[in-house]
Image (cartoon, rainbow, N blue to C red):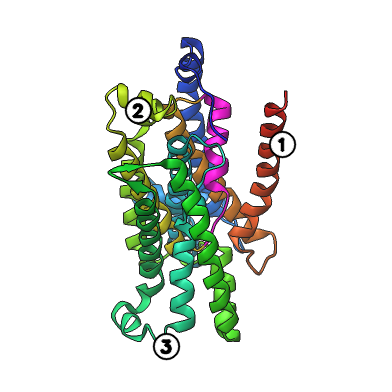
Amino acid sequence: MSYSISIPRLFRKKREGRAAIWILPLLAVALLGAVFLSLGVGGVSISIASSIEHFFSYLGLNQSTLEPQEILILEAVRLPRTALGLVIGMSLALSGGVLQSLFRNPLADPGLIGVSSGAALAVVSIIVLGDTFFAPFLDLTKNFALPIAAFIGSLSITILIYQLASRRGSTDVSMMLLMGIAVTAIVGSIIGLLTYLADDTELRSLTFWSMGSLSGAGKAAWPSIAIMIFSVIFLLRLASPLNLFLLGETEAKHLGIRTESIKRQAALAAACATGAAVAAAGMIGFIGLIAPHLARLIGGADNRFVLPASALIGALLILIADTIARIIVLPAELPIGLVTSFIGGPFFFVLLFREFKRRHL
């Protein structure tokens, strides 16, 4: 399954281009609203006006009217959580958008090339075998053990798949995609075996981690956040060369693009972004698939628009999903991965149906 994008469709008409210019500021405004909604909604409600007033108080413009308990909740719990959601949403969405353009496949996302499964295998190994085989690693990394393991696992699997798909200095992106699916299946069987060996406490930890949550926002997530910010900036810089990839790898090479370098940079940057996101919050599915498609639906296929729009939409979706997860089963909290799956599953079905219908017209 591949994109069929012609030059006139890729580079939009002037009128459509002007419309796309206005979409990004609108998305930014919507994201700002989602940020204040995320800061205010929960077991203790804090109004948007009170939140804004409180942050302005640090500039000496007014006095905060919040109670000490509300300030503690806002600054120590919700603000780090919201910040983590922003960078995770951007990272997953950008990774999906870049990989879809690289593979010229509308169904590509970071999970297909083994990034998520590599992180999952590393975390499951640490949880189940940490007291025996990985005790020195736990002693060395302490509270950072799971994030570091997840990041190393995702990056290692991506490098392995990239090497398996390379021959004589050239990487076949189709083979890379197939290798990713095969390796993901193998890794899944190993995870299943480790899960079978886990005790009740370990199974509970595995279950909560696999469903994803932003509740771990804190000092342990800082290295992951730094990696995601760097990766987001790097992925945004790939917009122009990826536009030419949509025309075909051979055409891109004839137009002067160093295709092997771009493939290597895109794969590694997406692995870093996704691995850091999984390390910080566990498995959160469908954002890398949904956000780029929504961006293309509202603004066309030009990656100079699609990538920044995907980042904004991904962050918006994560914050909305997290807000729903916090309030739908109060006083408990629903894992955010379940919410994104409820949203992404039907979207994925509609996408498959549309593609099937298009092919049989």
Q: Earlier in the sequence, mark 2 or mark 3?
A: 3
Number of residues whose C-alpha sits closer than 10 Å to that of mark 1, classed few (under 14), some (14–19) or many (20 or more): few
Which of pointers 1 and 3 indicates the residue nearer the eye?
1
Q: Over which residues does the magenta segment extend?
A: 283-300
| Residue, far front | 168
Q: Which residue is mark 2?
A: 240
Q: Quadrant of the C terminus?
A: top right
- The amino acid type of the residue labelled 1 equals Phe
Residue 139, how many percent across, how many down?
Answer: 31, 84
Q: Are marks 2 and 3 in contact (CB under 8 Å)?
A: no
What is the x, y in percent for residue 151? Answer: 37, 63
Amino acid on which the number 2 mark rests in the picture: Ser
Q: Does residue 290 show up magenta in the picture? A: yes
N-terminal-most mark, 1 or 2: 2
Considering only vertical position in the picture, is 306 above or below 131?
A: above
Q: Please tell me whether residue 38 is drawn above or below residue 43 in the rendered image.
A: above
Earlier-in-chain disc, 1 versus 3: 3
The quarter of the rendered structure image containing the N terminus is top right
| Dot 1 and dot 2 residues touching (CB under 8 Å) | no
Q: Is residue 44 left or right of residue 131?
A: right
Q: CA distance from mark 2 to mark 3?
A: 48 Å
* Residue at which label 1 appears: 353
Numbered badge on residue 131: 3
In the rendering, at what x and y percent does residue 258 appear?
27, 32
Nearer to the camera, 207 or 216: 207
Left/right of residue 334 with respect to residue 235 in the rendered view: right
Q: Residue furthest bottom?
A: 132
Label tally: 3
Reply yes or no: does residue 193 show up in magenta.
Answer: no
Main secondary structure type of the part rendered in magenta: helix
**Residue 19 tag number:** none
Q: Viewer-nearest of labels 1 and 2? A: 1
